[in-house]
Image (cartoon, rainbow, N blue to C red):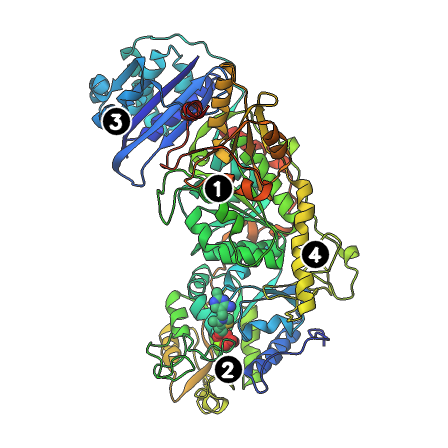
Amino acid sequence: MDYSVLIGGAAGQGMDTCAILLEKTLKRCGFSVYASSDYMSRVRGGHNFFYIRFSDRKLYSFSPRVDLIFAMNKETVDIHRSKLKENGFILTQETIEDIVTKLGNPKVINTVGLGFILKYFGLPMDIAAEVIKEEFKEGIIEINLRALEEGYKQSKNRYSLTTFKDESILINGNQAVGVGAIAAGCRFYCGYPMTPSTGVLNYLAAHSNEFGIAVDQVEDEVAALNMALGAAYAGVRAMTGSSGGGFALMVEALSLAGMIEVPVVLINVQRPGPATGFPTRTEQADLRFMIHAGHGEFPRMVIALRNVEDAFYQTVRAFNIAEKYQIPVLLMSDQHLADSVVTVKPFDFTKVKVERYISGEEEVVDEEYKRYRFTEDGISPRILPGKIPGQVVLVDSDEHDEWGHITESDEIRTKMVDKRLKKYEYLKEDIQEPWFIGKDKPENLIICWGSTYGAVREAVDRLIEEGYSIGALIFGDIWPLPTKRLLDFGKMAKRIIDVEQNATGQLESLIREVALMKPTDRILKYDGRPFSGEEVYKRIREVL
Amino acid sequence: MKYEYKLYEPSWCPGCGNYMIRTALKMALEELEIEPHEVVLVSGIGQAAKMQHYIKVNGFNGLHGRAIPPAIGIRLANKNLKVIVESGDGGSYGEGGNHFIHAIRRNIDIAHFVHDNQIYGLTKGQASPTTAMGQKTTLQFDGVKVEPIKPLALALTMGAGFVARGFSGDIPHLVSLMKAAIEYKGYALVDILQPCVVWNRVNTFAWYKNRVYHLPEDYDYTNKEEAMKKALEFDDKIPIGILYKEEKESYEDRFDFIKNGPPLVDRQLNPMDAERLMEEFR
Ligand SMILES: Cc1ncc(C[n+]2csc(CCOP(=O)(O)OP(=O)(O)O)c2C)c(N)n1
Ligand SMILES: [Mg+2]
């Protein structure tokens, strides 16, 4: 079984509530859920909608072919009618208008609709009732329970689905990053609100008192990264985040992070640019920007998050790597991953470790501590200011000597540049090869990165079922670019198809540059809407 | 002396006010019995901002105009560290003007010492936000065409709890201001008049010397209106001293978990503590 519901209407009509209630109910019924939202950058009006897909097997993507449309206004019907499957059903506002009027509160249209939908699929009402009791405030629970029941009564069974034991969590990409940061022991997060990254800031702010995390809404993104660097210098794990425009303002401080070798984690939840672009939509067009941002040459690591689990585990890993190499680690997400709500197994906290790499007094071998001591691997022992009486910690954005003092020496300059860049060599040991899915030795090799994983996964599974020799490499660690698997698989493949959500094929060009390998085809999308498995499938079929 | 580096000689010009400010800062730290490892000097870029290289304490020499943000980060991470921001008038009021305004709103516990030479020293003599209207500079050859910022008045209107002005030529007085600022729990601004012997031929040592006067003994620094008048007095006479002081809760103390617990940097990190977060997603 595999069903999809579309809920649409104008901003402010309360579809979000309806969507959350339905997602939670479906999750508690034991289904795999993949819900993707499409919203406009406005507070009232316009047209917003949700795709809520559910199944008894694991879902990797949303589906734009729907079984039921819950249309809160006429526009929704006009826009989405074509997405309805042959035997699909449209639940219009008129169908349940009378019940809503009877209940005397226009807002309950959401829960009436919910009841209607549940009955339609033959799902029990009690689970939804539980969810309502949890989600709503005291005074309005009663009326919503009645609304649920009325909606349920009004509807007819079309399907009678069986439910399963629920063992999953329901979470989105921004929340997963937030949980990862907390698990990693992040003690400082700051940011300036910017869609679609604000969810990370919100999540950490909501848990700041409980976990002792200083969360600051900064005056601007220039302050953000500089502030995080101050906190990290003082010795806490620090992180900041934004979307592309905000990241642009952090670029000078990113270069500072490279120069002063203070570990920091940063996330860019991408949205389409240039400039303000599409504030609430998705794209993967900041890859080159993230890899190259910052004046001068310094090491960094860039990790693209592929799904919510990856978002959690990689966020923790980012902190460990940042501190191990004393470099900035940049996470890349996007609106699609950030806002899509999916069911996954609860994260395994025994699998994540906090590795700090902070030195104690015994490791200070010089009479006066050298923050930038030349070492074999370019990584100097890091002590924290205030922790060792008699020793001070000096970091400097100017070129500096081993103690951190300004220097103009040509000799020291060369050695310092080498010292910083040497970290790349050792960093390679920590770099993870891209995930591989599909047939052994595939003739057709897809390459992609980040959140396109889900859509590609679904398309590849389907093509394999149809007998194609196909596989995919999905990059998470993307800078420095791991090339081993790429070269191994690339050699065997007849076709290499690049799938990306940008207009210029940024991963493809990176592969040509670093691996000297030329993909044969490109499937690019830059309309601001996420790839669905269906769409990737169709476009691969066109190429094959 | 304990704040002395053996090797590093200042790159300031002979006669520069920065030397006197450095002397005063060392004396203030000495008298407050602050050990080098207990304090962090945070600066941006400029002549003034090189202070960490000539006085041995912890140092964060960041980007031009961006001294305040790291200072805030440091304070939140480790409330046991004293944090002093040391930067020029250009970095503090120009490039970093936004951070200046918002540091006041936060009332973060830092002392901000602005070396105000009314010029961009390091970049060779362009107008700074405090250069007088009409003054000729290397860049503004026919005179500055914008009004100067009035930093103390601005700080007062923003609600700063500690607003002071000093003069590099009056070391004992400056030491007392610095000590009071460092001890103040919250954001403390000390605008320090300082001659630039090379690039500012108007606001010379003599120019300041002839104008500055100590606020009278009976001056009431809790009177905001009076403070505002003094903050705007910048012509034939320039008052120095603590113009305004008021006790306020510091930013750090507004976070209960910072106020009532160990410094964040000393807290243990155990991923298992976060496992309970899974519940809200069930
Ligand atoms: C982003 C950036 N812009 C410009 C500069 C060049 N710059 C360095 S110091 C400075 C002005 C210095 O003036 P001030 O802050 O008053 O310090 P002073 O040298 O007078 O002590 C400028 C413009 C820079 N380093 N970084
Ligand atoms: Mg200056």
Q: Mark 1 vs mark 4: which is more N-terminal?
A: 4
The amino acid sitting under disc 3 is: Ile
The residue identified by callout 3 is A79
The residue identified by callout 1 is A506
- How packed is label 4: few (under 14 Cα within 10 Å), some, or many (20 or more)? many
Front label number (2 vs 3): 3
Q: Secondary structure at mark 4?
A: loop
Residue A527 visible here: yes
Label 2 and label 4: CA atoms lie apart by 35 Å
Q: Pick whichever, A544 or A377, lies toward us.
A: A544
The amino acid sitting under disc 4 is: Ile
Label 2 and label 3: CA atoms lie apart by 68 Å
- How packed is label 2: few (under 14 Cα within 10 Å), some, or many (20 or more)? many
Question: Residue B219, percent across and down?
Answer: 43, 81
The residue identified by callout 4 is A383
**In this rendering, would A96 be left or right of A276?**
left
State whether discs 1 and 2 lie on one chain. no
Q: Secondary structure at mark 2?
A: loop
Q: Mark 3 vs mark 1: which is more N-terminal?
A: 3
Question: Residue B175, percent across and down?
Answer: 58, 79
State whether discs 2 and 3 lie on one chain. no
Residue under the point 67% across and 63% down = A414
**In this rendering, would B160 be left or right of A120?**
right
